[in-house]
Image (cartoon, grey):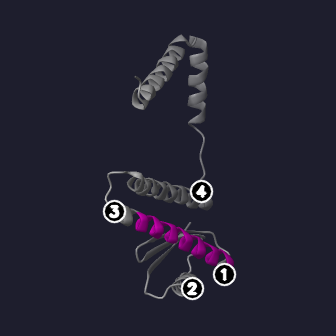
Amino acid sequence: MINKQNLWFITLFSLILILGIYYVSIDDEVAQVLKTEENNNTNEVIEITESDILVSLEVEKDEEKQTLMEEYQDILLDGESTIEEKNAAYENMQKLNDSTANENKIKELINEKFKLNAFVKIKDNTISIVVASSDHNNEKANSIIRSVQELYDKEMYITVKFNK
C-alpha cells in the first residue's frame, strides 16, 4: 500500500529525474544562448522604490502570520492535543486576527488623515510604523503617534520610521 509520503517522494523524484534528463539533453547551442542571456541581465541596475519596500515588509509579515495560523490550526485539529492547548491556540488565533484588524485600522487612519502609505506591525503593546515618505518631520511623526495612541485605552509603545 502506498501512503501519501511515498507518493510525494515518487512524484518529486520523477520530476527531478525528468528535469535532469532535459538539462543533459539540451544542445550546446541552446545552453550557450541561455548563458549569454544570463550574462547580459547581470549588468542591469534595479531601482527599489518606497512602495516596493512596504510591499516586501507586508509580504514578510503575512507569511509570518500565515505560519502561526497554520500552527494554531494544527493544534486545534490534532486529536492528541489537550483542551488547554486547544484553548490557548484558539485564543492566540483570536489575538492574531484582532492584531491584523487593528493594523488595518491604523493604516487606514494614516492614509486618510496624513495621506501617506504605511506599514504597521503590532506585537503585544508595541506598534511599529514605517511610513513611505522622504520628508522626515518630527512634528508629523508626533502627530501620527498621538493619533494612533487615541485608538487605545492603555499606553502603547509606538515607533514611527520614515523610509527614504
CA distance separating discs 3 and 2: 40 Å
Whether residues under marks 3 and 1 lie with C-beta atoms below 8 angstroms apart, the answer is no
The answer to whether residue 10 of the structure is visible from this angle is yes
| Residue 68 horizontal/vertical position (percent) | 43, 57
Marker count (numbered): 4
Residue indicated by mark 3: 83
Magenta stretch, residue numbers:
90-113
Nearer-N-terminus badge (1/2): 1
Residue name at image x 56 percent, y 80 percent: 137
Residue indicated by mark 2: 147
Residue 51, picture quadrant:
bottom right
Whether residues under marks 1 and 2 lie with C-beta atoms below 8 angstroms apart, the answer is yes
Q: Quadrant of the C terminus?
A: bottom right
Residue name at image x 61 percent, y 20 percent: 33
138 lies above or below 16: below
Category of crowding for the residue at label 3, using alpha-carbon neighbours closer than 10 angstroms: few (below 14), some (14–19), many (at least 20): few
Query: Nearer the viewer's eye, disc 2 or disc 4?
Result: 2
Q: Which secondary structure class fits the magenta region best? A: helix
| Residue 1 horizontal/vertical position (percent) | 40, 22
Residue indicated by mark 4: 52
Query: Mark on residue 122?
Result: none
